[in-house]
Image: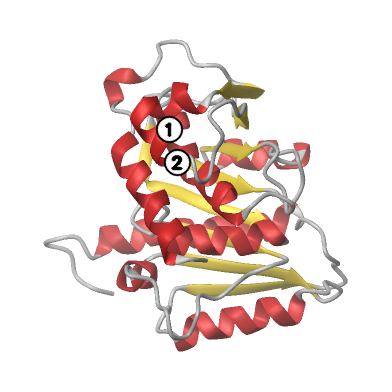
Amino acid sequence: MKRAVLNLLVLVLQVTGVATADEVVVAPQTGLFKLSFTPLELLGSRSTADASAILDSDDELSWQLFVPDTYDPAQPAGVMVYVSPTKKGGPPRVWNGLLGQSNLIWIGANDSGNRVALGKRMFLAMLAPRIVAARYAVDPDRIYIAGFSGGGKTAGFVMAAKPDLFRGGIYIGGAEMWGANDPPPQLEIIRQNYHVFLTGTEDFNERLTRRVYAAYRSAGVEHCKLIVERRHGHQLPGISAFSRAIEYIDSRIAVDANLAPGAEAL
């Protein structure tokens, strides 16, 4: 995407920042629910004006959240930010148990499908961790970006823009590579993050997904995993494949712990 729009996205996010722990509410809501805001409520007047190229001041912005009923503020949760190809940002119901087992809060913007401008889709995804962190205890090392189809491509652009915020990515049935002559400014951080490319043998985007996976590897991004489900078309993955994807991006935590000061490399 155009560098000017990318710079605007990052600038506004730097202004808004991330909520601090003392902002977390005492009795947070669990289950599946929607949160809605105006740009002014989220950004304030100055940042709303800065974001006028992406958002209209009278826009209603909403996100679908799923918070497992096992959420415990004493054990900060990870955040899975999802970019949907459709108008709905919620998770498949069959994944709810897996999200609970993985201690992950799900958040996806509504009305952010493939027909929405790329800059706006990226911006809504980048705002999502702040929305969760204002209400829940969040582990900043487990903030992830995921997307399906055109949302998978958008998720890749989000990772390229803010790899210091999103420490892992899951690109499902769609992926995109940054331009060969325009590498992301934070490429070294992208190389430190973990990435999963998930497709199926019957997915019309299988070749594209494989090609982008190979391009990441060629760019020196070693922490990549390709998962191809047999007899699976252009659709969200089954629980087993999605569980493997989460396990892989979570494996960075154990690696980082082993390489902490005083630890020996394996």
Residue reaching furthest to the left: 262
User: What's the distance in space between the residues labelled 1 and 2, CA to CA?
Assistant: 5 Å
Where residue 122 sits: x, y (%)?
Answer: 53, 51
Residue shown at 49% from the left, 16% from the top: 28
Which residue occupies the extreme bottom position in the image? 218
- Helix, strand or loop status at disc 2: loop
The image quadrant of residue 66 is top right
Tell me which residue sits at (58%, 37%) in the image: 107
Number of the label disc, if any, that sits on residue 160: none
* Residue 9 place in picture, x, y as percent: 42, 50
Name the quadrant of the C terminus.
bottom left
| Residue 120 horizontal/vertical position (percent) | 57, 47
Residue drawn at point x = 42 percent, y = 65 percent: 3
Q: Quick check: marks 1 and 2 in contact, CB under 8 Å?
A: yes
Q: Is residue 206 visible?
A: yes
Judging depth in this view, the residue of 3 and 239 nearest the camera is 3
In the current view of this chain or complex, which residue is farthest to the top?
A: 27
Residue type beneath disc 1: Thr
Please give the label number shown on residue 51: 2
Q: Height in image: 113 above or below 223?
A: above
Eyeballing the image, is 168 above or below 69? Answer: below
In percent of width and height, residue 226 lies at: 62, 75
Which amino acid lies under the numbered mark 2 shown in the image of this protein?
Ala
Identify the residue under disc 1: 48
Q: What colouring does the structure picture have?
A: secondary structure
Residue 222, quarter of picture: bottom left
Q: Is residue 104 left or right of residue 209?
A: left
